[in-house]
């Protein structure tokens, strides 16, 4: 069975060596490049299973690389994990909006990043057409549009159901408010940036103790606890 291949993009040689060492020891094949231009060329030639992408790059920066990757049919489906400096909330939001799956802030633990890589790859293998999602006693059934908590039915609005479906199908993934807005198209509630916050509050309340599983990622959006 072939090893999953990871493309690491960073202009700092020490970080490349650190990541390569840890990822190879975890059983992955690793390719490293130091510029955005090289990242685009390498991604198109080898089609890696995942890309770890630093946002601060010489020449084409990480956000532009992500934008080009996601707009190219040859690379659009490759998951991207962004590496960012602390305080770059605006860039994180833009990256997620462009289609990046996750982010890790510097300085970071190689073990944590490796775990994030494994989690993204694992989720990517899940069957997208699944109709029933069960997490921590919460069960969501898209076929009959039903949600239950510990066996008890919970009455949700169309928008609340759509939000929970988005979050629960990819636990650990961070979704920005705009991504949630684009998913929620029901007429039962005005869908705006702030109304999403209101609906999250209502959803948490209806889920009771399990509402804490919907986590706020400050400055970015929301995720369902992995």
Image (cartoon, grey):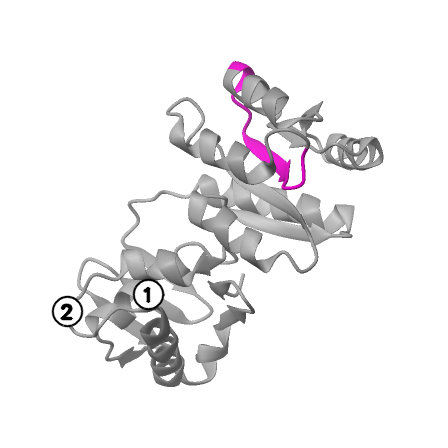
Q: Is residue 15 above or below residue 157?
A: above
Q: Secondary structure at mark 2?
A: loop
Task: Give the position of the C terminus as an image quadrant.
Answer: bottom right
Q: Residue at x 39, y 31 (%)?
A: 71
- Which percent across, then down, holds residue 73? 37, 25
Mark 2–mark 1 distance (CA, rounded to whole Å):
14 Å
Residue 170, position as x, y percentages in the image: 44, 54
* Residue 213 higher or lower than 121, as above or below: below
Q: Which residue is denoted by mark 2 in the rendering?
A: 187
Residue 76 locus on image (x, y percent) = 42, 31
**Residue plotted at (26% across, 62% down):** 184
Q: Which residue is most to the right?
A: 14
For label 1, the crowd category at 10 Å Cα-Cα, with few meaning under 14, some 14 to 19 and many 20 or more, is: some
Residue shown at 44% from the left, 43% from the top? 99
Highlighted range, magenta? 45-57
Label 2 or label 1, whichever comes before in sequence order: 1
Q: On the picture, is 10 further left or further right than 126?
A: right
Q: Is residue 158 visible?
A: yes
Nearer-the-camera pick, 179 or 156: 179
Q: Nearer the viewer, residue 157 or 134?
A: 157
Q: Position of residue 69 (x, y in %)?
A: 47, 30
Image quarter of the N terminus: top right
As for residue 187 lying within the magenta part, the answer is no
What is the residue that sits farthest to the top in this orientation?
45
The residue at which mark 1 appears reads as 163
Q: Quadrant of residue 207?
A: bottom left
Side (left or right) of 33 relative to 100:
right
Q: Residue furthest left?
A: 187
């Amino acid at each position: 069975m072939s090893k999953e291949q990871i493309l690491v993009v960073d202009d700092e040689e020490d970080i490349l060596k650190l990541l390569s060492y840890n990822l190879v020891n975890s059983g992955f094949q690793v390719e490293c490049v130091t510029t955005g231009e090289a990242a685009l060329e390498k991604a198109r030639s080898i089609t890696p299973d995942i890309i770890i992408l630093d946002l601060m790059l010489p020449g084409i920066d990480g956000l532009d690389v992500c934008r080009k990757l996601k707009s190219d049919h040859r690379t659009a489906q490759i998951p991207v994990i962004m590496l960012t400096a602390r305080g770059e909330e605006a860039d994180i939001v833009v990256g997620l909006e462009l289609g990046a799956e996750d982010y890790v802030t510097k300085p970071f633990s190689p073990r944590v990043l490796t775990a994030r890589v494994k989690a993204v790859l694992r989720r990517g293998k899940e069957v997208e057409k699944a109709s029933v999602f069960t997490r921590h006693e919460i069960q969501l059934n898209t076929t009959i549009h039903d949600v239950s908590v510990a066996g008890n039915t919970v009455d949700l609005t169309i928008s609340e159901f759509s939000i929970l479906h988005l979050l629960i199908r990819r636990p650990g993934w961070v979704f920005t408010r705009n991504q949630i807005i684009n998913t929620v198209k029901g007429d039962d509630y005005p869908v705006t940036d702030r109304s999403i916050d209101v609906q999250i509050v209502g959803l948490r309340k209806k889920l009771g103790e399990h509402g804490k599983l919907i986590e706020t990622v400050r400055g970015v959006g929301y995720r369902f606890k992995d």
